[in-house]
Image (tube, rainbow, N blue to C red):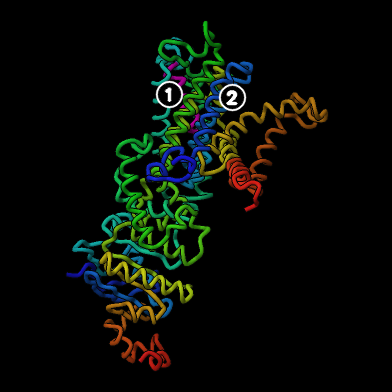
Amino acid sequence: MSVLEVTDIRLAFEGVIAVDGVSFEVGESELFAIIGPNGAGKTSIFNVLSGVYRPQQGTVRFNGEDLIGMRPHRIAARGMSRTFQNIELFSHLTVVENLMLGRHNHMRYGALSAFLWLGKARGEELKNRTAVEDVIDFLELEQWRRYPVGLLPYGVQKRVELGRALAMEPRLLLLDEPVAGMNVEETEDMARFILDVREELNIPMIMVEHDMGLVMDLADRVMVMDFGRPIRTGTPAEVQADPDVVRAYLGEQHRSVTT
Amino acid sequence: MKGRPELYTSYAQDMAFLNTRPKRVSVSALVVLALLIPFLITDDLLQLLATGFVAAIGAIGLNIVTGYAGQVSLGHAFFLAIGAYTGAALSGSETGRVIGFGITSLPIWLLASGLVAAFFGVLVAPVAVRLRGLYLAIVTLGLVFLGEHVFREWTSLTGGPGVGRPAAIPELFGVRLDRDNAVFTAAQQLYLVMFVLLVIFGVLARNLVRSRVGRAFAAVRDRDLAASVIGVDLTKYKVLAFAVSSFYAGVAGALLFVVNGFFDPGSFNLLLSVQYIAMVLIGGAGTISGAIMGALFITLLPRITRELPAVLPFISGDATGAITVFQLEAVLYGVLIIVFLIVEPRGLFGIWVRVRNYWRTWPFSY
């Protein structure tokens, strides 16, 4: 059974068509990658999935439930979590506080019990702090725990953002360019964490990424887009061999290197 | 863990209200000092400090909506006014010149003032959901002018401009706090009550901001897009921030004139809002202790400027002369805000952090 079914999405801003007739499915514990040139509509698809944009046409079914028209925080509560291309962390808060925010929906107490910080509020905070420490352990963030994230190096911030998404205990994880701007070492670290997420936590993922080496190594299936339209969806090997894909995105030279 | 005070062995210790020994020691020392002060200084200074404590409650409220939730509000004077008139009307004499219901028990009218102000905060909040930054500041500024007009015209409640009405009557367990009795003077009693109230409201606010709710406020302030994508309901938390902030403003407003005993509808003008903004910015936006420091600083400032004519003869102590102390005060609010924003944006709290960090590593620089 597929976790996510996207059918015939069309999203336009005034005259500009960002996404046109995109359909795909993501299966359980699958790593699905979306690639394409800049402006192909990859991030727009993420914004449709997480409820930031509302498409003019098409359906999104997440674990059997229709998401179109639902507000972002409700979609988040159903287990969709994401990272952003340009880091969107709460820069004045510490790593622990950012991760605790990822667990916002795992706590139920309201403002009145928060004022008193007794019983329910205290208990939930402690329980969720323990869960946050598991994520810190998983992503090896121990040494940065108490730092405001604005002060951390770029690669670590990317990791904290992944951590915040993981702290939500998602049922589907959207990764928007997880290794953009990273050096080789940081990229390898991130690849290792992504594999860990898949193997240990068994969370299905959709990844948008320009690093072809990473995409072709990690992804189960790849969708290639150009000008808002899907050109080809298939396994990495199939996609690399497709002449349309080579023309639109990969380039002749890349094919000769990778094949 | 003897000898290793900063080693935590449980998350409960790490997340405690005062989680280090220096914090516990210094806070206890401050509380003891504050409780001894009424027996050491004169009544007029005690009255000033009591007013400062009340202002601190109001500043904490403004800090919750502006410092934590990032919604700039210039309308604090309006919510202070709502609290002040609710408290005064509830506790006022039933037979007097202005509206009064004769409920003099302090906890009752205090809670009611907070709740009525919070109600108005919730009414205004939907605007905040749609606007941000400068636009929100202008809309909340409009509230102050609306309030000024209503309170000027509604003379059966406010007594009218230039006349005013008696402030709320503080009575606790049958004891009138604004009158001398066998044990304490009025100033000592009011000082102690205001101090206890500040401690209560300060602790409650600190609990709120370190909780799930406070983190959601900060998330809305720092990145509202990311906040909604991780599951924070933006509308709910903006409304909540306004409600809590107005509740604090209502409580502070009801208490603000108890020390003087009388107030005029003209008090709730733009300058009052600016003073509270100054308290938050000078004290340190986004910290509870900063709001308290800022409020005490701004409340004590007029007292200091009033001493200036004795030192600097070109400043005049009354309304005549080239530079009067009143002009100087108004200028100082502006200058201090500018200086703090440029030199130390984290305010007095930031200065304290720097001093603390210097001595923590002393005599080494790093």
Q: Main secondary structure of the magenta part?
A: helix
- On the picture, is B109 further left or further right than A206? right
Picture quadrant where residue A213 is located: bottom left
Q: To which chain does the residue with label 2 belong?
A: B
Q: Is B222 contained in the magenta span?
A: no
Q: Residue at x 81, y 30 (%)?
A: B312
Dot 2 or dot 1, earlier in sequence: 2
For the residue marked with disc 1, what is the amino acid? Answer: Leu
Crowding at dot 2, Cα within 10 Å, few <14 / some 14-19 / many 20+, comes out as: many
Point out the stretch of residues depicted in magenta: B78-91
Q: Residue at x 34, y 45 (%)?
A: A126
Residue B21: where, in percent of width, then height? 50, 38
- Mark carried by residue B18: none
User: How many numbered marks have been drawn onto this rendered protein structure?
Assistant: 2
Residue under label 1, please give it. Answer: B110
Picture quadrant where residue B205 is located: top left
Q: To which chain does the residue with label 1 belong?
A: B
- Mark carried by residue B49: 2
Is residue B347 among the parts visible in the rendering? no
Spatial separation of the CA atoms under disc 2 and disc 1:
20 Å
